Image (cartoon, grey):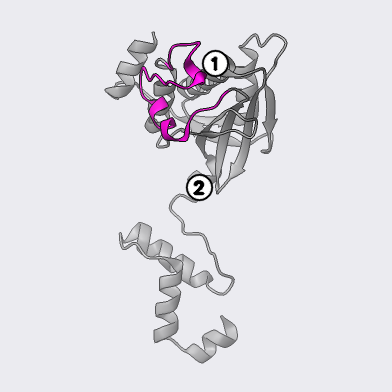
Amino acid sequence: DELLLLGSLERQELDIHTQPVTLKPWLAEILGGFDWGEHPVVFHCDLAPTAQVLGDPYYLGRAVSNLLVNARRHAGGQVALTALWQDGQVVLHIDDDGPGIPADSREQVLKPFTRLDASRNRKTGGYGLGLAIVRLVLEQHGGTATADESPLGGARFSVPATSLKQIRFRGTLRQQYDFSCGSAALATLLTYHYGFPVSEQQVFEHMYLHGDQKKIRKEG
């Protein structure tokens, strides 16, 4: 099943049906599909209960499930799933307290049949296809999964998700400076409607250089 799915993802043959997904109950449902025994996943959702992301709920769910299975396989006893708003986007972190992944191998583990010499995969023999599927599912959604060191001491896999809030402002350059509302609006128009990429700062500097500098200093 995983080999067939991997092949379909690599050939981009899957029909990805994106739709709004209410994040918190969707993640809770995924967690409810596992028998965690004496070590349930610690689940934190720092988003509004109604927060939504855009994606295919089945395939995104498959990616999150694969990361949870991987974390449980390698954990010493603690796995955590966290959903939060970070750097302007929704991010999911899956953490474990296992032996972790060496920094020079973190990109490699997202490739099929990766084997590492580190203790993290001595018992399991490798990472198989699960993490490669995660990478390809995220690529089909316009993102990517990354591996890093976990605050728990093991591995952290991070998955970005496109929120509906991001979708609304995808074609908008957000105002960064209090004095340049018109600059941000003009930069948005030039960048997204006329195909002339330009920043808010560049527009403001041009307007200031060629405009009424005295009035701009006084009124913005």
Crowd rating for badge 2 (residues with CA inside 10 Å; few <14, some 14–19, many 20+): few
Residue holding disc 2: 168
Q: Is residue 148 in the magenta section?
A: no
Magenta span of residues? 99-127
In this rendering, position of residue 79 left or right of residue 114: right
Residue ranking furthest to the right: 38
Q: Earlier in the sequence, mark 2 or mark 1?
A: 1
In this rendering, position of residue 133 left or right of residue 57: left
Tell which of 107 and 47 is nearer to you.
107
Q: Secondary structure at mark 1?
A: helix
Q: Secondary structure at mark 2?
A: helix
Provide residue 148's location: percent of width, then percent of height.
52, 35
Point out which mark residue 53 bears. none
Residue ID at (31%, 63%)? 196
Q: Quadrant of residue 200?
A: bottom left
Provide residue 143's location: percent of width, then percent of height.
42, 37
Q: Is residue 93 above or below residue 38?
A: below
In this rendering, position of residue 125 left or right of residue 179: left
Q: Quadrant of the C terminus?
A: bottom right
Question: Pointers 2 and 1 in contact (CB under 8 A)?
Answer: no
Crowd rating for badge 1 (residues with CA inside 10 Å; few <14, some 14–19, many 20+): some
Q: Is residue 91 above or below residue 117?
A: below
Name the kind of residue labelled 1 in the image.
Answer: Val
Q: Is residue 155 above or below residue 122?
A: below
Q: CA distance from mark 2 to mark 1?
A: 33 Å
Residue ID at (54%, 65%)? 176
Name the kind of residue labelled 2 in the image.
Answer: Arg
* Magenta span dominant secondary structure: loop
Provide residue 199's location: percent of width, then percent of height.
41, 65
Provide residue 78's location: percent of width, then percent of height.
67, 21
Point out which mark residue 69 bears. 1
